[in-house]
Amino acid sequence: MLSFFKTPRIRGGVHAEEHKTETAALPISNDFPLPKKLFIPLQQHVGKPAEPLIMVGEKVLKGQLLAYSQGLISAPVHAPSSGVIVDVNDYPAPHPSALPIRTIVLETDGKDEWMKTQAASDPFQLNPEEISLRVGAAGIVGLGGATFPTAVKLNMGRENRVDTLIINGSECEPYLCCDDRLMQEHAEEIIDGVRLMLHGMETDHAVVAIEDNKALAFFAMRAAAEPYASIKVIQIPTRYPMGWDRQLIRYVTGKEVPVGCRSSEIGVTIHNVGTAYAVHKAIRLGQPLLSRVVTVAGGAVLRPMNVEVPFGTLISELFDFCAVDKDQTARIIMGGPMMGDSLPHTGLPTVKATSGVLALTQRELKNTDEQPCIRCAGCVSVCPAGLRPLDMANNIRINQLDAAVDLGLKDCISCGCCSYICPSNIPLVQYFKYASGEVMARQQAQHKSEQTKKLIDARNARMERIAQQQREDELARIAAKAERERLKAEQEAAV
Ligand code: SF4
Ligand code: SF4
């Protein structure tokens, strides 16, 4: 049973400047013109990249499967519109490094012609496994930014007999309003998606948690959930990072997710409101995940908006549509300013994780004039993971990465609260991102060298077996020859 009114707790966090008022009032725009070319990366999710099954030159319809999922944790990719495949190659990824990633390029034909879809007339008659299968086939991943394949989570929820489904409507990152607008405008569809997820997980109770700075979304969702006793809609305090799954679980259920465990192991699963909406569309309409609502905001955006955008749209086209002043843009961020990625340029595509794209002016960026630490312990008090950021940073500065790991570096979620609060402008989170990357690279190098050593040992063992066999064969040959000669001598003696 739910226990969400039991001792709610919030650990750390900050009241970040919201910058939401203007954008939260803007209805979702469906006027974005279909781009002439879409650049669709095959890796838009956690897990293995999808594998293309189309050829260059092939005509495709909207919603058609372009690349299938590989292995247990992966997600397929579909055509966001109709047109012709013109390339399958490496193109820059929407990542701070912009390193190339395998990408399908679709030249749209302007018809936006749908393939035949498979809608479920009565989805509650489908068995729960069938719900997961359809969600997986629709390419749905966590749209809150985690991009973990949703079908895998539904299956884990069922297998672990999860008793509480939390729907994350916190949207705690500054500037972002896409979930807020989705809840205001599509509350009934989201609640339908929640009911379908409950059915898919064979779970009885859901809690939709919405930060209390989104009153209109809360009222819309509460009205939509009113007929269903299994779904509660609650308001939670506005505090970043309230949307972090461990924070939200602790607040809603009073349970702590142990380090190294998945939330399903303690009976809780979290999905984002956008994911619930995508599940509704996949099951009720048979539509795969092809687009999403993106918030375009920041001081350099002259026409900020929440806009429905097909995956693979170049940010440059989105910025043209929203009249972004390039001269005023000091930083481009995909996602929110706290946990999002700074992008080097706008020639990068939107993907399933793109909740927002920000064009920030110099005035909106934090002062980078770094001063010595004054040991105020502010960074310790705001850390939601209960870490000591200052001590970790000191160790990273002198390249003592193992000591930083011992202090909990791997538990850091890069939320940026410590950097945000630091009066000395010490870029703490940048240290942790750098160190986490280094630790991962070292582990990969060590894993590779261990694999290489294993291969060499196996090869040496095989060579030794072959040599041993050859020696034994030689001895056997000599013994046989001696036996033949002995027999021959005996025969000659008998004659
Ligand atoms: S918040 Fe900044 S100044 Fe204060 S202890 Fe942490 S690192 Fe030092
Ligand atoms: S970035 Fe890491 S160390 Fe800093 S507050 Fe967030 S979790 Fe704690």
Image: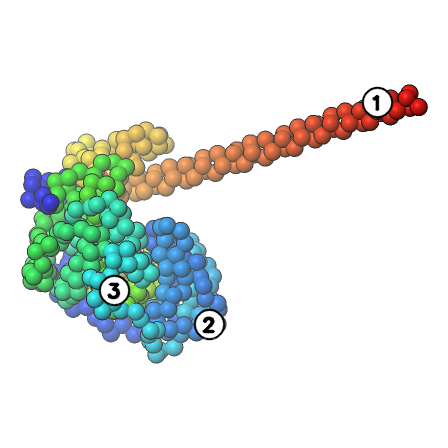
Residue tagged 3: 283
> What residue is at 35 percent from the left and 30 percent from the top?
402
Question: Which element carries disc 3, helix, strand or loop?
Answer: helix
Residue 432 position, x and y percent, is 30, 39
Determine the CA span between mark 1 and mark 2: 76 Å
Numbered circle sitting on residue 58: 2
Q: In this view, does 198 lie above or below 64?
A: above
> What residue is at 38 percent from the left and 39 percent from the top?
440
Mark 2 belongs to which amino acid? Glu
Numbered circle sitting on residue 486: 1
Numbered circle sitting on residue 315: none
In the foreground, 151 or 130: 130
> What residue is at 17 percent from the left and 33 percent from the top?
377
Q: Is residue 483 above or below residue 412?
A: above
Mark 1 belongs to which amino acid? Arg
Residue 184 position, x and y percent, is 13, 64
Q: Which of marks 1 and 3 is nearer the N terminus?
A: 3
Q: In which quarter of the image is ligand 2?
A: top left
Q: Is ligand 2 within 8 Å of the beta carbon of the residue shown at mark 2?
A: no
